[in-house]
Image (cartoon, rainbow, N blue to C red):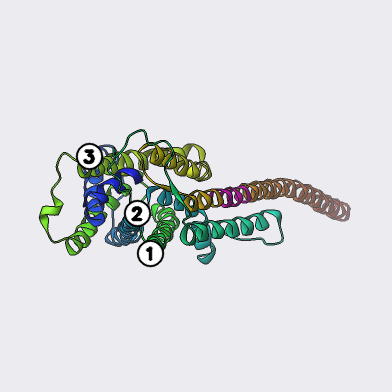
């Protein structure tokens, strides 16, 4: 996605126009199966829920994708893939602010989380402040994707890094509040289709403001069309569904563990396609991956501890009723004995009369 999008941007395509086309294609792909499979069994969509989904799409999809697109325009595909590793950490940081997560500093898991955040901060600093020498590794398909060989200026590079990190924060906000909002509207496919449709409307409003020359909107048989179709169908359509399926089967931690692979694959593809790679992106990507795994290790540890505590509480609750039942049964026996004894005394006193 990063390589194809970068090639389209270098070919003159406006990032906002690509975001609009991407959301429109995704809506066309997701709407028919969503209506066919989930519409009949879905709960009624209230106006308040629709407004919440619309605002969530504005922040987490439209804003995030536009920030990411312009950040990619100013930097490189390798850096864009590297900054993806900050997503779990930024999401955890936002979850702390919204009290959706806890941090126990005194425990090993809490210290590992802090260490992961510090390492990720170092990775971000390496990405933004240190470019290092540019070089090519394999260069098997020269100009296959149309990358420009001149790298960006230092100021433009800093601007691109800031935009990419801002995109991660908005995407993290989307992840946190999407889980809450889905409880009021659980159909996943319809939920995603409504977000894509809302994002299409919002992205069109932004794109028409950023690019008023409709000649630049035309798609020919070039990298612009490839980027639009690939990002709309494969990334937003197929990839979103596959991620939802994996989350359901293995959980969100399993998906997060695969995040550094995107950086590895993008770096290899960049080298093969004759794109420039700099030392700063590689160093930052390695640090971000290390920080990510530290946070995820701590998260898994905490989940195991919470599970053990819950099991202990369940065992205690199971044992408490047995004691109460024994106390109650003994108390009942004592009362019955007293009543029987009193009744026998009453019979003894009334018999002579």
Which SS type dominates the magenta stretch? helix
Secondary structure under the numbered disc 1 in the rendered image? helix
Q: In this orientation, which residue lies closer to the viewer: 316 or 330?
A: 316
Dot 2 crowding, Cα within 10 Å, few <14, some 14–19, many 20+: many
Q: Is residue 209 magenta?
A: no
Mark before the other along the chain sequence, 1 or 3: 3
Alpha carbon separation for disc pair 3 and 2: 32 Å
Q: Which residues are magenta?
A: 289-299
Q: In the picture provided, is 198 more to the left or to the right than 328?
A: left
Residue projecting furthest to the top? 140
Alpha carbon separation for disc pair 1 and 3: 39 Å
What residue is shown with label 1?
159
What residue is shown with label 2?
72
Relative vertical location of residue 248 with respect to residue 317 in this rendering, above or below: above
Relative vertical location of residue 268 with respect to residue 204 in this rendering, above or below: above
Q: Position of residue 297 (x, y in %)?
A: 62, 47
Mark before the other along the chain sequence, 3 or 2: 3
Quadrant position of the N terminus in the picture: top left
What residue is shown with label 3?
32
Of the two numbered discs 1 and 3 in the rendering, the one whose residue sits closer to the viewer = 1
Alpha carbon separation for disc pair 2 and 1: 10 Å
Q: Position of residue 307 (x, y in %)?
A: 64, 47
Q: Position of residue 132 (x, y in %)?
A: 48, 54
């Amino acid at each position: 996605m990063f390589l194809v999008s970068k090639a389209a941007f270098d070919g003159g395509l406006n990032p906002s126009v690509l975001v609009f086309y991407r959301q429109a294609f995704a809506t066309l792909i997701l709407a028919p199966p969503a209506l066919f499979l989930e519409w009949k069994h879905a709960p009624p969509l209230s106006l308040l829920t629709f407004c919440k989904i619309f605002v969530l799409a504005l922040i987490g999809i439209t804003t995030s994708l536009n920030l990411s697109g312009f950040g990619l325009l100013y930097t490189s595909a390798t850096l864009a893939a590297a900054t993806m590793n900050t997503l779990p950490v930024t999401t955890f940081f936002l979850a702390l602010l919204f009290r959706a997560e806890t941090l126990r500093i005194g425990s090993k898991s809490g210290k590992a989380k802090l260490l992961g955040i510090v390492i990720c901060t170092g990775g971000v600093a390496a990405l933004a402040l240190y470019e290092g020498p540019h070089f090519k590794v394999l260069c098997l398909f020269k100009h296959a994707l149309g990358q420009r060989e001149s790298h960006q200026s230092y100021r433009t590079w800093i601007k691109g890094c800031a935009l990419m990190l801002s995109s991660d924060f908005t995407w993290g906000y989307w992840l946190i509040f999407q889980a809450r909002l889905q409880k009021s509207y659980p159909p996943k496919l319809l939920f995603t289709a409504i977000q894509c449709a809302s994002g299409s409307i919002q992205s069109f409003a932004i794109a028409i403001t950023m690019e008023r020359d409709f000649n630049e909107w035309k798609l020919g048989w070039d990298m612009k069309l490839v980027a639009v179709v690939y990002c709309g169908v494969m990334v937003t359509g197929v990839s979103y569904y596959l991620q939802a399926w994996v989350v359901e089967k293995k959980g969100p931690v399993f998906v997060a563990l695969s995040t550094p692979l995107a950086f590895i694959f993008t770096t290899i593809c960049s080298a093969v396609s004759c794109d420039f790679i700099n030392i700063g992106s590689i160093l930052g990507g390695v640090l971000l991956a290390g920080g990510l795994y530290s946070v995820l290790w701590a998260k898994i540890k905490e989940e195991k501890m919470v599970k053990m505590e819950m099991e202990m509480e369940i065992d205690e609750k199971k044992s408490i009723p047995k004691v109460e039942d024994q106390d109650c049964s003994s108390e009942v026996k004592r009362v019955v004995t007293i009543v029987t004894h009193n009744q026998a005394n009453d019979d003894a006193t009334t018999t002579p009369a």
